[in-house]
């Protein structure tokens, strides 16, 4: 008697919230961070990236805020709905494991280099053609958003970033 193979149903969250996508996002964040001053991103700040981009309304606000406008204008837009700004901290806590797994995946894939003594992260490759398949539009939007966030964060101190976004470490 043969069993009928059931189709594999993967939730939308599982499709989007995986360490490979997170690795890509963190790599793009580090590229944006390095683009501003040529310095590496600081490790604690990467734990804010996925909570910003994996929440659809917040991602839309990142993409609708010009790179030159900065983090303060973005936070001001979020502050119009105070609960959206305060929710970043909760999402950061909920996504800690995914962020950590994404960091490991990114380092093992050669996208980033973690400097443990300085708690910094360098983007290794700036080559956009990594042999990746064509990405769907909803995922392709994440790259520019992550670079923008990295650029914004690089212009501020760590304390200014966490104070602006109301996040605690």
Image (cartoon, grey):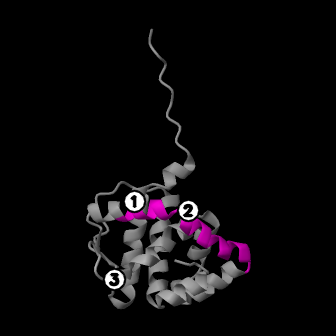
Please give the residue where the numbered disc 1 appears in the rendered image: 101
Q: Label 1 near label 2: C-beta < 8 Å?
A: no
**121 drawn magenta:** no
In this rendering, would 57 be left or right of 94? right
Number of the front mark, 1 or 3: 1
Residue 121 placement (x, y as % from top left):
33, 77
Upstream in sequence: badge 3 or badge 2 = 3
Query: What segment is highlighted magenta in the picture?
Result: 80-103
Q: Which mark is drawn over residue 94?
A: 2
Q: Label 3 near label 1: C-beta < 8 Å?
A: no
Please give the residue where the numbered disc 3 appears in the rendered image: 40
Q: Residue at x 58, y 86 (%)?
A: 163
Circle 1 crowding by C-alpha within 10 Å: few under 14, some 14–19, many from 20? some
- State the SS at label 1: helix
Q: Residue at x 44, y 64 (%)?
A: 99
How many discs mark residues in the rendered view? 3
Between 67 and 4, the one nearer to me in the picture: 4
**81 drawn magenta:** yes
In this rendering, would 22 be left or right of 138? left
Residue 13 placement (x, y as % from top left):
55, 52
User: Which secondary structure type mostly characterizes the magenta part of the structure?
Assistant: helix
């Amino acid at each position: 008697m043969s069993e009928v193979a059931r189709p594999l149903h993967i939730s939308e969250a599982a499709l989007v919230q995986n360490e490979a996508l997170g690795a890509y996002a963190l790599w793009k964040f580090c590229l944006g961070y390095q683009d501003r001053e040529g310095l590496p991103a600081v490790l604690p700040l990467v734990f804010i990236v996925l909570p910003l981009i994996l929440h659809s309304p917040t991602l839309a606000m990142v993409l609708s805020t010009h790179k030159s406008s900065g983090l303060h204008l973005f936070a001001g837009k979020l502050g119009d709905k105070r609960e959206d700004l305060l929710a970043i901290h909760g999402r950061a806590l909920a996504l800690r494991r995914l962020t950590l797994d994404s960091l490991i995946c990114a380092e093992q894939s050669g996208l980033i280099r973690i400097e443990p003594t300085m708690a910094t992260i360098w983007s290794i490759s700036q080559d956009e053609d990594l042999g990746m398949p064509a990405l769907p539009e909803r995922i392709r939007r994440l790259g520019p958003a992550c670079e923008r966030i990295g650029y914004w964060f690089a212009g501020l101190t760590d304390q200014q970033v966490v104070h602006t976004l109301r996040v605690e470490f």
